[in-house]
Structures are given as C-alpha cells and as structure tokens.
Amino acid sequence: MTNFGSGQRAAGSGQRAAGSGQRAAGSGQRAAGSGQRKPEACVLFAVRSAGALHRLLDVLPVFDGDERVVSRFTLVPGSDFDVDALAALDRSDTRLLTWDEARSRTHGLVLTASPKGAIRVLPGPHVLLPHGAGFNKALPDEGSPHLPSGLDPHYLLVDGKPWAALHALAHGDQLDRLAAHCPPAAARATVVGDPTLDRLLASLPHRDGFRAALGTGERRLVVLTSTWGPESLLTRRPELPAALARVLPHDAYQLALVLHPNEHSRLGSYDLRRHLAPALRAGMVLAGPYEEWSALLIACDAVVTDHGSTALYAAALGRPVVGAYDGGDELIPGTPMATLLERAPRLTDPAGLAEALRAASAQDVRKCAHAAFDLPGESLPRLRDELYRLLGLRPRAVPVRPRPLPAPRRPAAPNGPAAYAVRTRVTGRRVAVERFPTDTSLPAHHLAAESPYAGPRETQSAAVLWRRSRPAAGTPHTSTWTAGGWTARMLDELPYCDTAAAILTPERCLLRHRTAGTFRLRIEPHRADGRVMRADPAAVVSAVHSWLGSRPERVAPGTLLCDVGPFSVRAVLEPADDADLDDEL
C-alpha cells in the first residue's frame, strides 16, 4: 500500500508536466489537501497495446465506490502497437502518467495484461491478467519457441524469480499448465475467473436491443473472427468476407467481422476499410476493437473463426462455431481452442456456409468453453478480494458488478447495399425473392437499385428503382417530389426501368409498373410467437415486379405471398388514388 503523503506531492508535479488532463488531476489533488480526504492507494494500469487496455478496463469495476483508490494509466514502451494503444488510452478518458513519471514513484498496485516489455521495472506489487481466453498459442518469434504465450518463463521470471505478486487466471487447467511450465510463478497464482466473459454474460439480456441497433431483424447474424499474425483468417483468406457477402442472401443473413485489436493497429482504419470495401459495400458490419466485438457475439447466431480465442467466448454463450483455420505452428494441440476447432465443422468454400452452419448448430460447444473458463459470474468479487489484500485495504461493502456493454453503432448503411442482383421464383401468387450484391456470380432475374444512392451505371441498368421517404428538411424553403411525380419521372427518363416504387412507410408504397399500371402496395407484417416481423419493402417491390412481369394479361389487384428471408409477408395490390400519388417523398 502506498501512503499518499510526500508521494502525492510528487504526483502533482509530474502531472502538471504531462498536459491539461494531468493539470485537472493535479487540481483535484490540491482540493483534497484543503479539507477532502486524500486517496490511500494508487493503482497503475500498465498498457502495451489496445487489446491489453481493453482487458484492463473490464477489471475497473472492482474499485467502484471507493474514494480511497485512484487509478492511473501509463503506456509501456516497446510494442509494435503502441501508437494505437496511446490513441485508445486517450479515448478512454483515463488519467495518464508518462513512462518516466510511472517509473519514478511507487504504486499500490501495478496491473497489466501482458508480461512483455519493461513492465517489471515499475515500482509496486504487480498483478498479471491473461491477455485472452486461455493460453492457446505459441509464437515462434517470441520468447521460448513452442511454449504457450503467457506461460513462458522467459517473460515471467527475473533471475529465476517471478516478478508478479499475483497471476489471476481464468481456469484451474491454466494453473496446472503454469505449474508445469513455470513453477515459481504458479506459487503466486490463483483462479478468479474471466472478467470479460462475465461482462458478456451480464449483457445477454440486451441481445434484442443489440440486434435492433444493427438492423439485423430476423436474419441470421454470422460473425467472422480473425486473430492477428501470419496464420490469421484475414491474412490467410483475405477474400473470404467479400466472397461470403456475394453468396449469402441479404434478407436471410447479416455478416459481421471481428478483428483482433492488433490488426486494427497494424493496418489503421483507413487501409482496413479500403481492404474490406467490397464486403462493407455489401452490408458487412466491421466491429470496433473495444466492447463492440462483445456486443456482436451476444447478438450473433453463429461464428466462423480461425484459431483466435474470441471464438471461445462465443462458445461460452452457446453460439455455433464453424472453423476456418488452415493450420500452422501457432495453435497448441490439446488446448481449449484446439479442441473447439477439432469438433467444429470446417468451412472450405463460401458456398458451403449454410451446410456448415447446420452441422455446427447440432453441436453443443459450451463444453469446450468450460475448459477455458471457471467460476462464471464470480470473477470481479474474487479479483477484488485479491487486489485489496495486496493493497492492504478492506473492500467497501458495495456490490461489484460488470458494466453492461453499450449497444453497437448502427451500420453506416443500415438498409444494406444501394443495388442488388435479385433472384425470384414465381409460383402462382407466391413469390420467393433473394437479393445479393451486384457482383455475385449467381444468376439473377433483375437488377434493383436505390435512388439516389446507387451509382450511375446501376441506376441506368436497373429494372427496379426505389426511393425511400426522408424526414422533412428543417429549412424554410423546400422542394420535394410527390410519389406520383417521382415514379413517373423515373419511367420516363430510364428506358430499362420497368418498375419505380416510392417507399412511404415500412408498410406502404406507391408502385408504378410500365405496362401493368400504378398501385398502392400494402405490406402486412408477419406475426408469430408474439413477435411482429417486417420485411424490407424494397425486397417486396422486387417480388411484385417479378410477379407482374410473369403475367401476359393485364392483372387485377389482389394479394401476393412474398417469401423474404426467413419469413413470409402478404403484399396487397390496390388501385392507387390521388392521395397516394400526392404523398411527398
């Protein structure tokens, strides 16, 4: 435990040199000297990478409600990913110490999620947390070849002695493995569980909200997970996200990608989005490196993974897992991740995903996760007891709980691509419709595009063109199209367009067909099991277009049954009246 007397004065002088954020911290400490109770302990979070920072932030609730403890963060030099780690620290609103400041004072505790680098020189008792879900990989270019990363004596010992006062592990098997590889460190280890998993479990009730934020609806959300390094999915199979997007029907599947934070750091947001542009244009969601990946695991229906341990968290939630690891030297046989991949069906061809998902759904992968995580729901109370023991303080008598995950950001294009290659099957008054990105290799019935967001070539070539009603502009002078005016203009200007539709609400459209006439289209939501499900009206417009085109005779208004993704909706065609034509877009 650090007594904040003269040491606190030193902290104030160092913080004034560190920047405005530290000046704010210094002023708070001066206020403490003028009557408020001074903190009794400083906990330093030592960070080498953004991923390590995210693990440590999940631990912060152990100190909630305790004014005796202050937290400070510092960036440990020497990592290839330290630039992004510094940016992540800046976004976290934490109080930062420079490396020189952190080395110059004694801390009540030093918490870290990586044993590498110069962390051991920081004064104070050290606590080492795992960097991920278990110790599944060996990195040949680091430390001792073929030893598990995180259990290597090369990083855990100094002159044959452990430098960490506590190794906080997630499972008893990890303790056994640490004892086998580094007995001195195992003498200072205990099993507390996994704070990141507990945060996931605590956020499970928010699944519906997360799916609503993503615009998932009743589609199957499939998450690709890729670790970092030469054997990662994104390195070995960089074409897979776009290839899957081209063969998965948009109204039946939603695709998302979760990358290791080091991949975000290595490439940077600009190049990463440029590399993934084909899949992103097709509607794939790219998860942020902190919290959002966890929300996607809660929201998803299945995971396609390489050998990164993110999939173990998905397995712990009971999500089906499909393997996409091509093998190599990093994955250690017999580890929980290796066992999971041995049992999971493997994806070799993007066209085989549906079959692989069926096979994965028949397996209970939670048993594999049980080998990686002990004591679910107990990690923060157990970890708090251990940390306060090292601080020499009695914990406050307040509950300690994981912080619920925030909802993921809404995708930039929540309605999907601006143009589709559409496949349809007309059987009487029933129409099945499937929509794919325009660069799919699958045969299609027609091209459908959204005005004004589709490109000029797609707009000129589309047989179906639709436009969605927009909120009223907040300006005094406005000019808007009516539904009748816009649909007539499109058929007049675009010779290849046979159907133009103004989507006025999720349940009502004005549809103008070049030969069949102009209709009010009502779309009845599907109701089942206490839920109300609505299909994208643009998909229903394509179904109606195909049905109208299949009738050699002039059709009478009536009702169609449209199969869109996982459910069916009724589409009612009625004669349009003047009020329908005059609705404003």
Image: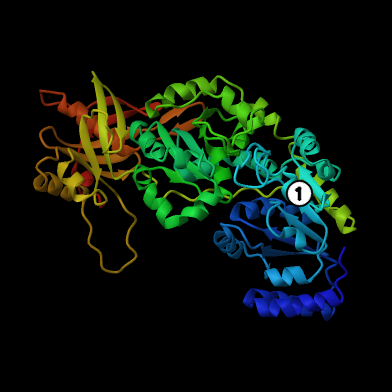
Question: What amino acid type should be assigned to the residue bearing mark 1?
Answer: Leu
Residue 102 coordinates in the image, percent (x, y): 73, 68
**Is residue 555 shown to the viewer in this render?**
yes
Tally of numbered tags: 1
**Is residue 401 shown to the viewer in this render?**
no
Q: Please name whichever residue, 392 or 342, is drawn nearer the observer in this view of the structure.
A: 342
Q: Quadrant of residue 254?
A: top left
Q: Is the residue 419 above or below the residue 362 in the image?
A: below
Q: Residues within 10 Å of mark 1 (few under 14, many from 20)?
A: many
Residue 385 coordinates in the image, percent (x, y): 85, 49
Q: Residue at x 44, y 21 (%)?
A: 355
Indicate the quadrant containing the N terminus: top left, top right, bottom left or bottom right. bottom right
Q: Please name whichever residue, 115 or 576, is drawn nearer the observer in this view of the structure.
A: 115
Q: Is the residue 289 above or below the residue 429 in the image?
A: below
> Judging from the image, what secondary structure is the residue with disc 1 in?
helix
71 vs 227, left or right, is: right
Q: Give the residue number, with chain letter if any, for mark 1.
A: 156
Residue 50 coordinates in the image, percent (x, y): 59, 55
Residue 419 coordinates in the image, percent (x, y): 27, 42
